[in-house]
Image (tube, rainbow, N blue to C red):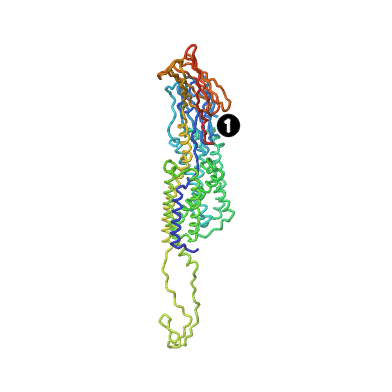
Amino acid sequence: MRPVPRPARTSLTVLALLAAVCALLVGGAGSAFAHAGLSGSDPADSTVLKEAPRHVTLTFTESVTFSEDSLRVLSPENRRVNPAPAQYADGKSNTARVQLSDELPQGTYTVAWRVVSADGHPISGAFVFSIGKPSETAAVVPDGSLDDSAVGRLYAFFRHLAYSGLALLVGAAAFVAVCLPGAGGERPVRRLLAAGWAVLVVSTVALLLLRGPYETGGGPTSVFDLSQLGRTVVGRPGAALVVRLVLLAAAAVLLGRCAVRLRGRDDGAEPRDLGRRDRRVGAAFALGLAFTWAAAEHASAGIQVPLAVPVAVLHLVAMGVWLGGLITLAIVLRSRGAAGRTVPADAVGRFSTMAFAAVAVLVGTGMYQSWRQVGSWEALTTTSYGRTLLVKVAVVVAVLWVASFSRRWTGRLLHEAAPAAGSTRTVPEPERVKVTVGAPDVPAAAGGAPDAPGGGEVRGAAVPPPPEADVDPRAHQRGLRRTVAVEAALGVVILAVSTLLTGTQPSRAAGESAAAAVAAAQEPQAKVATVPFDMGKAGHQGAVQITLAPGRVGENTVEAVVFSADGGLATVPELRLTLTQEALGIGPIDAKLKNQKGFWAVYDLQLPMPGEWTLNITVRTSEIDQVTVRGSVHIAALPRRPAA
């Protein structure tokens, strides 16, 4: 293998660093997302209703799943007033609706909800609405973060262990299969493979048991609830964990088969080749394990899911090959160095090539994932996901900088291995020397020559080559071992940050939730129309002020106030209001206003269509005098919500 010239190595390092900087968008190991967010509710937060609603409906930014206790409506006395569990509203998977009990008393009601978004992460929240008038409430709703609970912390810990086990298992197997088959027979590498498999099995079992309490907000003691476990395994995250356990059981059989082939090779002899079939089966297992993450987390929700899932699979496999391979190389260098042995330079070169390809895949897939999850450059600094991503990118740049030194050590090893493998020293065959019988011997080393006195003839004598400079390859391997150890340590930091990213709401989803909240805040809370009318006396002109809230399609509250000529409130014996949508031929719709002792009102006027509505107002100012005037008001359409 030809050594890489130093200028070329430097150029490659600079290009790698530039690629990392351009990849400020390297995605998380679980690849994304996006968490759902509440985009609307009916009744809305903090609204005061004249009459009790028949149900409560929540709308989310993406599809959600829920359990029996996902949606609770609590009375002012902290009693549950929704007798049945939540259902989808009109079959829409991004909604949740519960029916309410009949004859609810006045006061403030609390709606507490906890659902699971399409990417497998639970989200929760609460809001209030009032019937008649607001009141004090005894309802208490937890307001802490889901990850601050004991179950949340345990789930995050075992999630990190699962990623670590995947990296060790995939990376060590790839190193043995591609770079150095002989390492598979060494005890430290066998222990590393067994440790990666065991960590992944234990963490997967723990995640499966914790999944139910994590979704429902239960305590650690509920992990052995069989009914809850049964509901977990039929959900998508639980099913993915079960498939992962099945793949790990099959992987144990494959590892045992390979261990039989490599057994008894602790003497350093090259083992029998694993074979192309075993490599393909191992690659299929790695892809299958990575798919159990991609199919149940960020990649499975949001935009471009058919493309995002395979990209996330490649990202996870590349992460395992790079990080796990680094740890395996560090262990092999250390174990062989302690025994006075060296790692073949061509094996180091093969790993360098494999690691470079893995990093290239990580950068490419990470850029796509980050574009998909972040959405904008501004979100890198304005959201928790973006700021955490910047931390990860900084560590990645540090890793690539350290990797440049590792490539230098690798180049020196290959440079020294090339002449040693390509040059052989020939030893000249001894030739007979004619010596006169009885003549003294003339050693060649003493300056004898073919024409020396005594008739001695020396032919074919070779001058020994000059001694070559002694080069100890172990010195270069010690340097490589140090830089690889630093790379592996930084890789563990990247893995920890990536685990944190998988539990953080992606910037694109956070932006959609914020945009929905802003849109709801910007929607007009009421539409007001003021129409003047003649009060029946010269120079006396009053006005009627009509207020419709919220002024959009659906149920509206209508309040009407009459002002006298001097701007004060006026009382009239009768006030009638009808609404007509002339463009569509709808109406007239009688509002049926009722006298509320100072103003006229109705609280359940239904307007079916948006657009310009004509107000026909009849004001009776005395027993015999009345006037009819016309005005107009624009009724808004229902707000459009993001599709699930």
Which residue is at the front of the view, 447 or 279?
279
Q: Residues within 10 Å of mark 1 (few under 14, many from 20)?
A: few
In the depicted structure, whether residue 472 falls above or below residue 218? below
For residue 608, side relative to residue 333 (left or right): right
Asked whether residue 540 is in view, the answer is: yes
Q: Position of residue 615 (x, y in %)?
A: 51, 23
Asked whether residue 195 is in view, the answer is: no
Which residue is at the front of the view, 64 or 368?
368
Which residue is at the front of the view, 201 or 389?
389
In the depicted structure, whether residue 623 falls above or below residue 498? above
Residue 446 location, quadrant: bottom left
Q: Position of residue 370 (x, y in %)?
A: 48, 45
Q: What SS does tag 1 mark?
A: helix
Residue lying at the far top in this picture: please name it.
Answer: 623
Q: Amino acid at mark 1?
A: Gly
Residue lying at the far front in this picture: please name it.
Answer: 538
Residue lying at the far right in this picture: please name it.
Answer: 277
**What count of labels does the image hold?**
1
Q: Position of residue 72 (x, y in %)?
A: 49, 27
Residue at the disc numbered 1: 91
Report the quarter where the C terminus lies.
top right
Q: Position of residue 574 (x, y in %)?
A: 49, 15
